[in-house]
Image: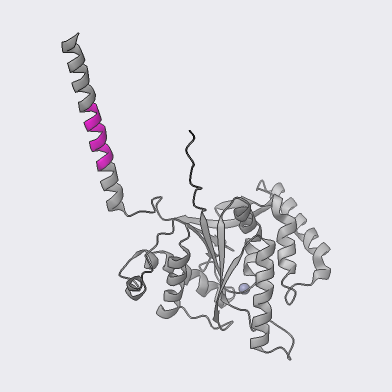
Protein backbone atom coordinates (compact mmCIF):
# COMPACT_ATOMS: atom_id res chain seq x y z
CA UNK A 1 0.00 0.00 0.00
CA UNK A 2 1.41 3.34 -0.95
CA UNK A 3 0.80 6.36 1.20
CA UNK A 4 -0.83 9.29 -0.57
CA UNK A 5 1.30 12.33 0.07
CA UNK A 6 -0.41 15.66 0.51
CA UNK A 7 1.04 18.16 -1.98
CA UNK A 8 3.51 20.53 -0.36
CA UNK A 9 2.11 24.00 0.17
CA UNK A 10 3.49 26.36 -2.49
CA UNK A 11 6.11 28.84 -1.38
CA UNK A 12 4.87 32.42 -1.39
CA UNK A 13 6.48 35.69 -2.43
CA UNK A 14 5.20 39.26 -2.32
CA UNK A 15 6.51 42.07 -4.54
CA UNK A 16 5.81 45.57 -3.20
CA UNK A 17 6.54 48.36 -5.65
CA UNK A 18 5.58 52.00 -6.11
CA UNK A 19 4.22 52.10 -9.68
CA UNK A 20 2.93 49.80 -12.40
CA UNK A 21 6.02 48.86 -14.52
CA UNK A 22 8.51 49.07 -11.56
CA UNK A 23 8.41 45.27 -11.26
CA UNK A 24 8.93 44.63 -14.97
CA UNK A 25 11.86 47.07 -15.12
CA UNK A 26 13.67 45.69 -12.04
CA UNK A 27 12.73 42.06 -11.38
CA UNK A 28 10.40 40.72 -14.09
CA UNK A 29 12.74 37.83 -14.91
CA UNK A 30 13.13 36.85 -11.25
CA UNK A 31 9.38 36.86 -10.74
CA UNK A 32 8.80 34.76 -13.87
CA UNK A 33 11.47 32.29 -12.68
CA UNK A 34 9.82 32.03 -9.23
CA UNK A 35 6.47 31.39 -10.92
CA UNK A 36 8.02 28.67 -13.13
CA UNK A 37 9.52 27.12 -10.00
CA UNK A 38 6.03 26.79 -8.49
CA UNK A 39 5.98 29.80 -6.19
CA UNK A 40 2.78 31.76 -5.65
CA UNK A 41 3.74 35.36 -6.28
CA UNK A 42 1.51 38.32 -5.43
CA UNK A 43 2.11 41.87 -6.66
CA UNK A 44 1.28 44.87 -4.47
CA UNK A 45 1.28 48.21 -6.30
CA UNK A 46 1.20 51.15 -3.92
CA UNK A 47 0.17 53.73 -6.53
CA UNK A 48 -1.54 53.15 -9.85
CA UNK A 49 0.87 55.49 -11.64
CA UNK A 50 -1.88 58.03 -12.26
CA UNK A 51 0.51 60.94 -13.00
CA UNK A 52 2.75 59.18 -15.54
CA UNK A 53 1.70 60.71 -18.86
CA UNK A 54 2.54 63.54 -21.25
CA UNK A 55 -1.04 63.50 -22.56
CA UNK A 56 -2.87 66.51 -21.06
CA UNK A 57 -6.25 64.94 -21.88
CA UNK A 58 -5.64 61.85 -19.76
CA UNK A 59 -6.78 62.57 -16.16
CA UNK A 60 -5.58 60.65 -13.09
CA UNK A 61 -8.66 58.43 -12.76
CA UNK A 62 -8.56 57.26 -16.38
CA UNK A 63 -4.78 56.88 -16.42
CA UNK A 64 -4.82 54.95 -13.11
CA UNK A 65 -7.44 52.53 -14.48
CA UNK A 66 -5.49 52.11 -17.73
CA UNK A 67 -2.24 51.42 -15.88
CA UNK A 68 -3.86 48.89 -13.55
CA UNK A 69 -5.12 46.99 -16.62
CA UNK A 70 -1.62 47.17 -18.14
CA UNK A 71 -0.13 45.86 -14.87
CA UNK A 72 -2.52 42.92 -14.79
CA UNK A 73 -1.68 42.03 -18.40
CA UNK A 74 2.06 42.28 -17.61
CA UNK A 75 1.60 40.09 -14.51
CA UNK A 76 -0.16 37.46 -16.64
CA UNK A 77 2.84 37.41 -19.03
CA UNK A 78 5.03 36.59 -16.01
CA UNK A 79 2.67 33.89 -14.72
CA UNK A 80 1.27 36.00 -11.85
CA UNK A 81 -2.44 35.93 -11.11
CA UNK A 82 -2.93 38.39 -8.27
CA UNK A 83 -2.27 42.14 -8.13
CA UNK A 84 -3.25 44.22 -5.11
CA UNK A 85 -3.66 47.97 -5.80
CA UNK A 86 -3.46 50.28 -2.75
CA UNK A 87 -4.27 53.36 -4.93
CA UNK A 88 -2.20 55.90 -3.05
CA UNK A 89 -1.93 58.96 -5.37
CA UNK A 90 1.19 58.77 -7.58
CA UNK A 91 3.98 61.00 -6.22
CA UNK A 92 2.30 61.37 -2.82
CA UNK A 93 3.33 58.23 -0.94
CA UNK A 94 3.98 59.29 2.67
CA UNK A 95 5.80 57.07 5.14
CA UNK A 96 3.33 57.36 8.02
CA UNK A 97 1.89 54.93 10.54
CA UNK A 98 -1.27 54.44 8.49
CA UNK A 99 0.65 53.55 5.31
CA UNK A 100 2.94 51.13 7.16
CA UNK A 101 -0.19 49.55 8.66
CA UNK A 102 -1.55 48.98 5.13
CA UNK A 103 1.67 47.18 4.18
CA UNK A 104 1.64 45.15 7.41
CA UNK A 105 -1.90 44.02 6.63
CA UNK A 106 -0.92 42.93 3.10
CA UNK A 107 2.06 40.99 4.51
CA UNK A 108 -0.07 39.31 7.16
CA UNK A 109 -2.72 38.35 4.61
CA UNK A 110 -0.37 37.13 1.84
CA UNK A 111 2.07 35.52 4.36
CA UNK A 112 5.14 35.40 2.08
CA UNK A 113 8.49 33.95 3.04
CA UNK A 114 10.16 36.29 0.52
CA UNK A 115 9.46 39.95 -0.19
CA UNK A 116 10.92 41.99 -3.05
CA UNK A 117 10.80 45.79 -2.88
CA UNK A 118 12.78 48.90 -3.81
CA UNK A 119 16.08 49.64 -2.06
CA UNK A 120 14.92 52.78 -0.27
CA UNK A 121 18.45 53.58 0.91
CA UNK A 122 20.19 53.88 -2.46
CA UNK A 123 20.30 57.67 -2.67
CA UNK A 124 18.24 60.04 -4.76
CA UNK A 125 15.58 58.59 -7.07
CA UNK A 126 11.79 58.87 -7.37
CA UNK A 127 10.48 59.73 -3.90
CA UNK A 128 7.77 57.04 -4.16
CA UNK A 129 10.52 54.44 -4.72
CA UNK A 130 12.46 55.63 -1.66
CA UNK A 131 9.39 55.85 0.54
CA UNK A 132 7.94 52.47 -0.49
CA UNK A 133 11.30 50.72 -0.03
CA UNK A 134 11.85 52.07 3.47
CA UNK A 135 8.24 51.57 4.65
CA UNK A 136 8.03 48.01 3.26
CA UNK A 137 11.23 47.04 5.06
CA UNK A 138 9.90 48.51 8.33
CA UNK A 139 6.67 46.57 7.76
CA UNK A 140 8.67 43.30 7.48
CA UNK A 141 10.86 44.02 10.47
CA UNK A 142 9.64 44.35 13.10
CA UNK A 143 6.05 45.49 12.57
CA UNK A 144 4.33 42.53 10.87
CA UNK A 145 5.85 39.93 13.22
CA UNK A 146 4.84 41.59 16.50
CA UNK A 147 1.31 40.85 17.67
CA UNK A 148 1.32 44.11 19.60
CA UNK A 149 1.99 46.13 16.43
CA UNK A 150 -1.26 46.98 14.67
CA UNK A 151 -2.95 44.80 17.30
CA UNK A 152 -6.36 45.79 15.90
CA UNK A 153 -5.53 43.62 12.83
CA UNK A 154 -4.57 40.69 15.04
CA UNK A 155 -7.80 41.14 17.01
CA UNK A 156 -9.77 40.48 13.79
CA UNK A 157 -7.86 37.24 13.16
CA UNK A 158 -5.02 38.48 10.92
CA UNK A 159 -2.03 36.63 12.38
CA UNK A 160 1.47 38.11 12.72
CA UNK A 161 3.91 36.85 10.08
CA UNK A 162 7.69 36.44 9.82
CA UNK A 163 9.22 37.17 6.43
CA UNK A 164 12.65 35.54 6.29
CA UNK A 165 14.16 37.06 3.16
CA UNK A 166 13.98 40.45 1.46
CA UNK A 167 15.44 41.26 -1.96
CA UNK A 168 15.99 44.99 -2.49
CA UNK A 169 15.82 45.97 -6.17
CA UNK A 170 17.73 48.87 -7.70
CA UNK A 171 20.44 48.63 -5.05
CA UNK A 172 23.81 50.39 -5.41
CA UNK A 173 25.38 47.55 -3.42
CA UNK A 174 23.92 44.33 -4.84
CA UNK A 175 25.04 41.06 -3.25
CA UNK A 176 22.58 38.65 -4.91
CA UNK A 177 22.23 37.91 -8.63
CA UNK A 178 19.44 35.92 -10.26
CA UNK A 179 20.23 34.39 -13.66
CA UNK A 180 17.19 35.24 -15.80
CA UNK A 181 18.59 34.09 -19.14
CA UNK A 182 15.59 31.73 -19.59
CA UNK A 183 13.12 34.59 -19.10
CA UNK A 184 14.30 37.30 -21.51
CA UNK A 185 11.39 37.13 -23.96
CA UNK A 186 8.77 37.04 -21.22
CA UNK A 187 10.43 39.92 -19.44
CA UNK A 188 10.29 42.05 -22.59
CA UNK A 189 6.73 40.96 -23.42
CA UNK A 190 5.67 41.96 -19.90
CA UNK A 191 7.39 45.35 -20.20
CA UNK A 192 5.66 46.01 -23.51
CA UNK A 193 2.29 45.44 -21.83
CA UNK A 194 2.86 48.85 -20.22
CA UNK A 195 1.96 50.44 -23.54
CA UNK A 196 1.27 53.88 -22.02
CA UNK A 197 4.92 53.94 -20.83
CA UNK A 198 6.94 51.79 -23.24
CA UNK A 199 6.93 52.00 -27.05
CA UNK A 200 6.42 48.58 -28.66
CA UNK A 201 8.32 49.90 -31.69
CA UNK A 202 11.40 49.96 -29.44
CA UNK A 203 11.47 46.21 -28.87
CA UNK A 204 14.57 45.68 -31.04
CA UNK A 205 16.28 48.60 -29.32
CA UNK A 206 15.43 47.14 -25.89
CA UNK A 207 16.83 43.73 -26.82
CA UNK A 208 19.99 45.42 -28.14
CA UNK A 209 20.49 47.37 -24.90
CA UNK A 210 19.90 44.27 -22.75
CA UNK A 211 22.43 42.37 -24.87
CA UNK A 212 24.99 45.17 -24.45
CA UNK A 213 24.50 45.14 -20.68
CA UNK A 214 24.86 41.35 -20.60
CA UNK A 215 28.12 41.57 -22.58
CA UNK A 216 29.44 44.29 -20.25
CA UNK A 217 28.59 42.15 -17.23
CA UNK A 218 30.28 39.09 -18.76
CA UNK A 219 33.43 41.13 -19.46
CA UNK A 220 33.42 42.29 -15.82
CA UNK A 221 33.19 38.66 -14.68
CA UNK A 222 29.57 38.88 -13.52
CA UNK A 223 26.59 36.68 -14.48
CA UNK A 224 25.65 38.09 -17.89
CA UNK A 225 21.85 37.84 -17.84
CA UNK A 226 21.16 38.65 -14.22
CA UNK A 227 18.84 40.80 -12.16
CA UNK A 228 20.66 42.11 -9.12
CA UNK A 229 19.48 42.70 -5.57
CA UNK A 230 20.68 43.43 -2.08
CA UNK A 231 19.60 40.40 -0.05
CA UNK A 232 18.67 40.68 3.61
CA UNK A 233 17.75 37.73 5.82
CA UNK A 234 15.95 37.78 9.12
CA UNK A 235 16.69 34.37 10.65
CA UNK A 236 15.77 31.03 9.08
CA UNK A 237 12.96 29.91 11.37
CA UNK A 238 9.41 30.92 10.57
CA UNK A 239 8.20 29.79 13.98
CA UNK A 240 8.95 31.68 17.19
CA UNK A 241 12.15 30.82 19.02
CA UNK A 242 10.32 29.63 22.11
CA UNK A 243 8.51 26.87 20.23
CA UNK A 244 11.75 25.92 18.45
CA UNK A 245 13.38 25.52 21.85
CA UNK A 246 10.43 23.46 23.09
CA UNK A 247 10.58 21.26 19.98
CA UNK A 248 14.31 20.70 20.46
CA UNK A 249 13.71 19.82 24.11
CA UNK A 250 10.92 17.37 23.17
CA UNK A 251 13.20 15.78 20.56
CA UNK A 252 16.00 15.47 23.17
CA UNK A 253 13.60 13.82 25.65
CA UNK A 254 12.31 11.39 22.98
CA UNK A 255 15.86 10.38 22.10
CA UNK A 256 16.78 9.94 25.79
CA UNK A 257 13.68 7.78 26.37
CA UNK A 258 14.47 5.64 23.32
CA UNK A 259 18.03 5.16 24.53
CA UNK A 260 16.79 4.09 28.01
CA UNK A 261 14.35 1.63 26.44
CA UNK A 262 17.07 0.15 24.22
CA UNK A 263 19.28 -0.27 27.27
CA UNK A 264 16.48 -2.08 29.18
CA UNK A 265 15.85 -4.40 26.22
CA UNK A 266 19.55 -5.19 26.01
CA UNK A 267 19.70 -5.92 29.74
CA UNK A 268 16.60 -8.14 29.57
CA UNK A 269 18.01 -10.06 26.62
CA UNK A 270 21.32 -10.42 28.45
CA UNK A 271 19.69 -11.95 31.55
CA UNK A 272 17.66 -14.35 29.39
CA UNK A 273 20.75 -15.45 27.51
ZN1 LIG B 1 8.39 53.84 -10.48
**Residue depicted at 36% across the width and 69% down the height:** 157
Residue most extreme to the front: 1
- Image coordinates of residue 85 in percent, x first then y, are 56, 75
- Image coordinates of residue 266 in percent, x first then y, are 22, 17
Is residue 96 in view from this perspective? no
Is residue 139 in view from this perspective? yes
- Image coordinates of residue 115 in percent, x first then y, are 51, 61
Residue most extreme to the left: 271
Determine which quarter of the picture holds residue 151. bottom left
Q: Indicate left or right for 205 with 263 as reference.
A: right
**Residue depicted at 50% across the width and 67% down the height:** 121
Q: Which residues are magenta?
A: 250-259
Examine the structure image and report whether residue 254 is included in the region drawn in magenta.
yes
Q: Which quarter of the rendering shows the C terminus?
A: top left
Q: Indicate left or right for 56 with 44 as reference.
A: right
Examine the structure image and report whether residue 182 is included in the region drawn in magenta.
no
Residue 183 lies, with reference to residue 137, above or below; the image says above
**Residue depicted at 26% across the width and 33% down the height:** 255
Which one is in front, 88 or 120?
88
Here the colouring is one colour
Which one is in front, 169 or 181?
181
Residue most extreme to the top: 273
Q: What is the tally of numbered marks visible in this picture?
A: 0
* Quarter, ligand 1: bottom right
- Image coordinates of residue 248 in percent, x first then y, are 28, 42
Determine which quarter of the picture holds residue 124. bottom right
Residue 259 lies, with reference to residue 26, above or below; the image says above
Name the main secondary structure of what is drawn in magenta. helix
Q: Indicate left or right for 270 with 153 as reference.
A: left
Amino acid sequence: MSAVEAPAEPRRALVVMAHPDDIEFTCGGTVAQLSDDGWHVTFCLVTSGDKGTKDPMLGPADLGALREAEQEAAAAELGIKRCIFLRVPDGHVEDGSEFRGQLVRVLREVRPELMITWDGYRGFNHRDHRTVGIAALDAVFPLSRNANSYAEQVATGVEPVRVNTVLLAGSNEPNYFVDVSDQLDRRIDALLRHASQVQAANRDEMVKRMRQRAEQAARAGRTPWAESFRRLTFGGASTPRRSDALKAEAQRQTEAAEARQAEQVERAEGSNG
